[in-house]
């Protein structure tokens, strides 16, 4: 076994010689000169094996005599010498291996997934700041550090991770949910105060101490139901105040709408298309574009280039849309202002009716200092009690 391995490394040649009668003596002399005495002879054919160096000398002598033969040479050394004799093929193999190693370490395409409100361009620009972009080397990216730094830099994201599959990178993003307003602890001590001025018409106390009476006038912030109340058995207790306080109120809904408005209009627009390879960009529509104004807005669209099927090429088609926005002053008519006021008043009214009742309303409109002013005075009955957490201060 070891002998076969050694023969394969240094190289081995196998001869099969078909000699005619006139060549028998000459062939035997050649073999004896080369040190071969134990050759196998069968059906007029001489078979033997030797190392590759001796095989070359024997083959030259047989060629000189015109003796037909079959030669089979194998071995690492033989293949290496044969490859070295073909410089072009060898150079091509080396270049192909080097290019494959170089290009396989490059990210050719980045796909962003999971984002809804955050644009792809925003995420790609932020990744570019951390050294991750189409054309960067995979070996230069530390995914753990990238994930940590990205999430610290963007509070809109609750999760971010990048998966690299070959030369493609997929960035998974989960947008954070805004934290809503939390309700006060239902068991914590809490007073009920007035949210606006009014005249109390009815008060129902479920827990706590009553501080006002029916028909009493109250002002904004006045205590209506206290968290302190007195019992016959244990004295004063501190509980969460619960109850409703209805009062006659006269709220005022006022809105000032500017008489002049500014509308954006595109005065100039131009496109620039190019093909990107690594950090290089080649324009394909006749040159580069010079920015004319600082107000010019840029919108970029990128598309990967595929060959037949799903074979992704290391190219990116990039389209940049430049738009110059100008603002034109126009006068707003009274009817337009009226529509704006009606929509806002309708929204405010629907929210108000959840805790009250509108008895009457009176709307006044006039112009003042470049504004359309709308004033709506209402007469209502509403629950004016709101919770105010009980504050305990330590000296």
Image (tube, rainbow, N blue to C red):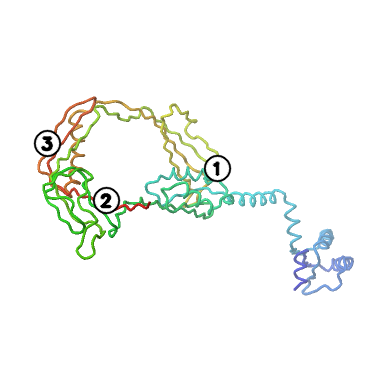
Neighbor class of circle 1 (other Cα within 10 Å; few <14, some 14-19, many 20+) is some
Which residue is found at the position 54% from the left and 49% from the top?
Answer: 107
Residue 316, image x, y percentages: 49, 43
Query: Residue 306: x, y in percent?
Result: 48, 48
- For the residues carrying marks 3 and 2, which lies nearer the camera in this image? 2
Vertical relation: 159 (above or below) 368: below
Disc 3: CA contacts within 10 A as few (<14), some (14-19) or many (>=20) = few
**Residue 188 falls left or right of residue 233:** right
- Residue 79: x %, y % from top left: 73, 59
**Mark 3 highlights which residue?**
362
Q: CA distance from mark 1 to mark 2?
A: 61 Å
Q: Earlier in the sequence, mark 3 or mark 1?
A: 1
Of the two numbered discs 3 and 1 in the rendering, the one whose residue sits closer to the viewer = 3
- Secondary structure of residue under mark 3: strand
For label 1, the residue is: 278
Q: Which sits earlier in the primary sequence, circle 1 or circle 2? A: 1
Name which residue lies at 40% across and 44% down.
Answer: 119
Q: Nearest to the eye among marks 1 and 2: give it.
A: 2
Q: CA distance from mark 3 to mark 2?
A: 32 Å
């Amino acid at each position: 076994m070891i002998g076969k391995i050694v023969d394969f490394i240094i190289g081995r040649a196998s001869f099969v010689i078909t000699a005619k009668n006139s060549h028998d003596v000459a062939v035997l002399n050649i073999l004896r000169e080369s040190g071969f005495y134990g050759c196998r002879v069968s059906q007029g054919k001489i078979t033997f094996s030797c190392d590759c160096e001796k095989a070359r000398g024997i083959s030259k002598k047989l060629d000189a005599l015109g003796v037909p033969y079959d030669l089979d040479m194998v071995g690492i050394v033989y293949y290496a010498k044969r490859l070295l004799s073909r410089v072009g093929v060898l150079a091509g193999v080396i270049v192909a291996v080097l290019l494959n190693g170089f290009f396989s370490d490059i990210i050719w395409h980045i796909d962003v997934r999971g984002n809804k409100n955050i644009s792809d361009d925003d995420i790609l620009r932020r990744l570019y700041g951390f050294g991750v972009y189409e054309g960067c080397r995979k070996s230069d990216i530390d995914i753990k550090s990238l994930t940590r730094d990205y999430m610290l830099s963007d509070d809109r994201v609750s999760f971010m991770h990048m998966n690299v599959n070959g030369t493609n990178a997929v960035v998974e993003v989960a947008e954070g949910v805004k934290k809503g307003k939390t309700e006060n602890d239902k068991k914590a001590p809490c007073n009920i105060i007035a949210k606006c001025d009014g005249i109390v018409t009815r008060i129902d106390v479920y827990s706590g101490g009553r501080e006002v009476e029916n028909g009493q006038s109250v002002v904004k912030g006045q205590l209506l139901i206290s968290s302190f109340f007195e019992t016959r058995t244990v004295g004063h207790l501190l509980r969460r105040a619960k109850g409703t306080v209805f009062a006659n109120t006269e709220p005022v809904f006022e809105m000032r709408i500017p008489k002049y408005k500014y509308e954006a209009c595109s005065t100039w627009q131009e496109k620039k298309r190019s093909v990107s390879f690594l950090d290089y960009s080649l324009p394909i529509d006749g040159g580069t574009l010079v920015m004319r104004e600082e107000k010019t807005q840029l919108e970029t669209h990128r598309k990967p280039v595929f060959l037949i099927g799903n074979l992704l090429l290391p190219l990116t088609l990039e389209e940049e849309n430049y738009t110059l926005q100008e603002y034109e002053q126009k006068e707003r008519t009274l009817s337009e202002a009226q529509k704006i006021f009606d929509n806002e008043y309708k929204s405010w009214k629907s929210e108000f009716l959840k805790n009250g009742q509108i008895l009457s309303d009176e709307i006044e409109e006039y112009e003042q200092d470049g504004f359309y002013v709308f004033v709506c005075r209402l007469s209502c009955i509403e629950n004016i009690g709101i919770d105010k957490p009980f504050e305990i201060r330590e000296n």
